[in-house]
Image (cartoon, rainbow, N blue to C red):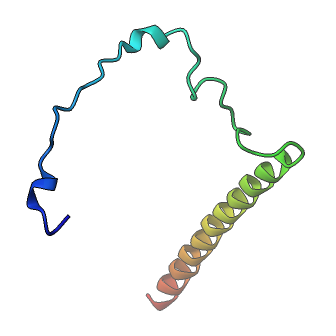
Amino acid sequence: MLRDPTSKRPKEELKHLVIDYTQFDEWSSDEEGLDATAGIEAGYEHWQDREDDDEEREEEQDVEEAAAAITTQEAVESGEN
């Protein structure tokens, strides 16, 4: 290919395929029928709920720790005045 530079030139015209996508309007799409458990193997759906619960608990714990830190800081500042 490097020896013959003419091999890079197209020898025939490329043809384009025109597709009428409206003919597929009645087909179901990949997005239809997807729910929260899509892609999860049967019998393992409960693991998704457990992960969500763990994340919520971690967020609640972070909020509680932040509130405790603010309360501690306020107590320290009021004791210094």
Q: Residue furthest right?
A: 43
Q: Residue at x 70, y 38 (%)?
A: 38
Q: How many marks?
A: 0
Q: Does residue 32 lie above or below 11 as drawn?
A: above
Q: Residue at x 43, y 87 (%)?
A: 81
Residue 42 in percent (x, y) is at: 86, 42
Decide which of 12, 72 is in the foreground and name it: 12
Q: Is residue 18 left or right of residue 11?
A: right
Decide which of 21, 80 is in the foreground and name it: 21
Question: Which of the 4 quarters of the picture holds residue 40?
Answer: top right
Q: Residue at x 58, y 74 (%)?
A: 71
Q: Does residue 58 lie above or below 48 as drawn?
A: below
Give the position of the N terminus as an image quadrant.
Answer: bottom left
Residue 30 in percent (x, y) is at: 58, 28
Q: Residue furthest bottom?
A: 80
Decide which of 61, 2 is in the foreground and name it: 2
Q: Residue at x 71, y 43 (%)?
A: 39
Residue 27 in percent (x, y) is at: 56, 14
Question: Which of the 4 quarters of the picture holds residue 59?
Answer: bottom right
Question: Which of the 4 quarters of the picture holds residue 61?
Answer: bottom right
Q: Is residue 59 left or right of residue 52?
A: left
Q: Does residue 16 lie above or below 55 as drawn?
A: above
